Image: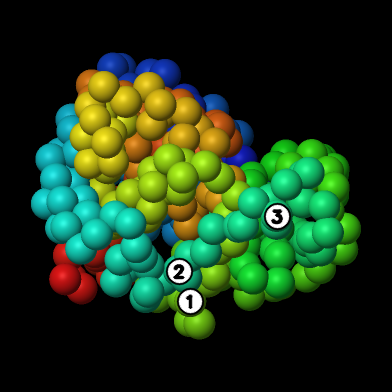
Amino acid sequence: MNNDFDRIARAIRYITTHRLDQPDLDAVAAHVGLSPYHFQRLFTRWAGVSPKRFLGFLTVQHARALLAQDASVLDTALDVGLSGPSRLHDLFVSFEAMTPGEAKNGGENLTIRYSVLDTPFGVAVAMNTPKGICGLEFIEPHEDPRARAQLRWPGAHLIKDCDPDLAKRLFAPTPQPPIPLHLKGTNFQIQVWQALMSIAPGHLTTYKRIAERVCSAKAARAVGGAVGANPVAILIPCHRVIKESGAVEGYRWGSERKRALITWESTHEDTHVHAQDHF
């Protein structure tokens, strides 16, 4: 699976770099070292659309269209109250902030289990306290997952674990049972992360738009910092925040992966339960 994502990531990087030239199937297939026939099958199986249509999803115009869709989604979600979990959270994720005592000293007195996940977007390491996921990060295939967990939680007691079903649940239309999160962050960061979870799959927003709803449009830079500090990929969908220009850049786990996630959600949005379907 990871080799598939590596090829898709290389294809996305190539298409993005050469998008003004509108590269054809033969050119992209040759770049990733596959025959056009096999590349077409791999790409369509992975993305659910052909490479040609995928190219269309990567354009700035498409990103702007997704941004336009987001207004009603985010407004509706936040109308129910940013200070508490929305109905979308209840369906998908149960959310709890750590107490200062739990969060202090890098997780001292916390037992954290970590699992290596093989996802469609690369290898990830999930970190769990007894109350829920406290970290989910993409890592390089050669990277030591324990070292990544230790970097985030230097004071915790780490135990290697195995959760073979978690990767599937991350991308399921309705994870059952809901996936709990147990997060360390400032009050402001928690507010921003809650706002991110109100953005439905297949929709995008901007840093400024989130800032307007959390506090003030002038806080867009601070919102950017909170988005960048997100400790849980996928479930707190920081990949759905882009620049107002429509440029899909800036993701702690790589711009190619961000584009892949956005495009995958765009092409699979009919399989997801949208926020507005529940209000």
Work out how far the residue at label 3 is from the one at label 2, CA to CA, in angstroms.
23 Å
| Residue reaching furthest to the bottom | 177
239 with respect to 66 (left or right): right
Q: How busy is the neighbourhood of tag 2: few (under 14 within 10 Å), some, or many (20 plus)? A: many
| Amino acid type indicated by mark 3 | Gly
User: Who's the residue at 20% across and 63% down the image?
Assistant: 80
| Residue reaching furthest to the front | 101
Determine which of the numbered discs, if any, sits on residue 101 in the image: 3
The local secondary structure at tag 2 comes to: strand
User: Who's the residue at 45% across and 69% down the image?
Assistant: 93
Q: Decide: marks 2, 1 in contact (CB < 8 A)?
A: yes
Q: Position of residue 123 (x, y in %)?
A: 68, 50
Nearest the camera: 277 or 13? 277
The residue that label 2 is drawn on is 93
Nearest the camera: 101 or 56? 101
Q: Decide: marks 3, 1 in contact (CB < 8 A)?
A: no
Q: How busy is the neighbourhood of tag 3: few (under 14 within 10 Å), some, or many (20 plus)? A: few
Residue 24 shows in this picture: no
The residue that label 1 is drawn on is 178
Residue 20 shows in this picture: yes
Which mark is first along the chain, 1 or 3? 3
Which mark is first along the chain, 2 or 3? 2
| Amino acid type indicated by mark 1 | Pro
Q: How busy is the neighbourhood of tag 1: few (under 14 within 10 Å), some, or many (20 plus)? A: some
Looking at the rendered image, the quarter that the C terminus falls into is: bottom left
The local secondary structure at tag 1 comes to: loop
